[in-house]
Image (cartoon, helix red, strand yellow):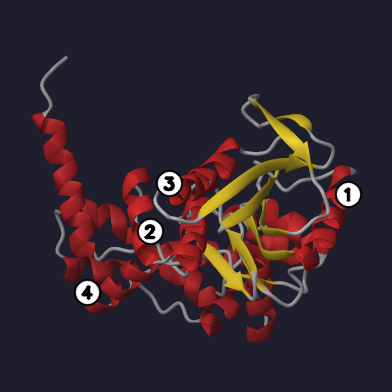
Amino acid sequence: MTRHLNFLVYPGFVLLDLSGPMEVFSWGSQMSAESYRITVTSLEGGPVRSSCDLEVVTEALKTEASDTLIIVGAPAPPEGQEVSGIAAAIAGMSPLVRRIGSVCTGAFLLAESGLLDGRLATTHWFFAPKLQAMYPALRVDGDRIFTHDTGIWTSAGMSAGIDMALAMLEEDLGKEIAQAVARMLVVYYRRPGGQYQFSSLLELDPGSDKIRRALSFARENLSQNLSVERLAEVANLSVRQFSRAFVASAGMPPAKAVERLRVEAARPMVEDSRRTFDEIARLVGFGDPDRMSLSFIRTLGHTPSEIRRLSRQAVSATRAKPPL
């Protein structure tokens, strides 16, 4: 059995958003009796220049049956006259395709096509608030590495496209093949779709002055009670108004943002090794090491103990290197 995969690109696309998932399916073909036929397409065909100036030869996108259509991302959400044409082509292809996915800001093109209406979606954490604001019919979760909602997949930026492709490969060819491909690519098999993307909330600067004030208060008072009621009071909004405005500005609920802020503040102290986990948990507002550990697992995929161990190993390896 051969499955036909279409990767849709456009001027300024990110090369890794294309090449990463392509390698997953290419290796899957080599390791299975089934195979993938991969086509790189654009609206008109011909050479298409990527964001790093490398050109890729493409075929013109045809409205024909295929197994999977993946819309590749760009460094920023696509804009201009070409957007409506690409979105219309995606919508036209959808009845003929078993599975549709996007990498990073490719989600904006999927959203413009209408296929994400009412569905859960993700994109790069930096652009998640913009995706939600532009397309309120979606349910955007800016934390997820990838989502899968009734045949429509979306993924976060860069390497997250590989995670999504591995999950698709597992759906097609089984867990053993997907694991073998991950080993060949020397990537984790596989980060769960719900694991948080990394983003620096410590540096986030939302557009709303009231939300900015609440975030600044949270950053400066991590050891205190930072309930949604307290933050709404700081922002001078009702709890309901504050929660809605916060999600629109930060791409996540207030409680999740506070957890992330605390993890980001605690991580350097965990890696430094000079403080106990009890001390760190109290300093950043977790209260106890168990709660801190659960938050680390949700946010970073590792416990504080694992992060400290990995940090020590990295320091030891650096010290052990002979001088050049």
Circle 2 SS class: helix
* Mark toward the start of the polypeptide (4 vs 2): 2
| Residue type beneath disc 3 | Gln
Frontmost residue, 79 versus 258:
79
Q: Which residue is mark 2?
A: 177
Circle 3 SS class: helix
Identify the residue at image location x=60%, y=79%: 232
Distance of mark 4 from mark 1, alpha carbons? 52 Å
Q: Which residue is mark 4?
A: 289
Distance of mark 3 from mark 1, alpha carbons? 35 Å
Identify the residue at image location x=48%, y=60%: 169
Q: Nearer the viewer, mark 3 or mark 1?
A: 3
Residue 90 image position (x, y, % from top left): 80, 57
| Residue type beneath disc 2 | Ile
* Mark toward the start of the polypeptide (4 vs 3): 3
Whether residues under marks 4 and 2 lie with C-beta atoms below 8 angstroms apart, the answer is no
Picture quadrant of residue 141: bottom right
Q: Is residue 297 left or right of residue 15?
A: left
Quadrant placement of the N terminus: bottom right
Residue 15 image position (x, y, % from top left): 59, 36
Q: Which residue is mark 3?
A: 30
Mark 4 neighbour class, 10 Å CA radius: few under 14, some 14 to 19, many 20 or more? some
Is any part of residue 186 visible from this angle? no
Q: Which residue is mark 1?
A: 85
Circle 1 SS class: helix
* Mark toward the start of the polypeptide (3 vs 1): 3
Mark 1 neighbour class, 10 Å CA radius: few under 14, some 14 to 19, many 20 or more? some
Whether residues under marks 4 and 3 lie with C-beta atoms below 8 angstroms apart, the answer is no
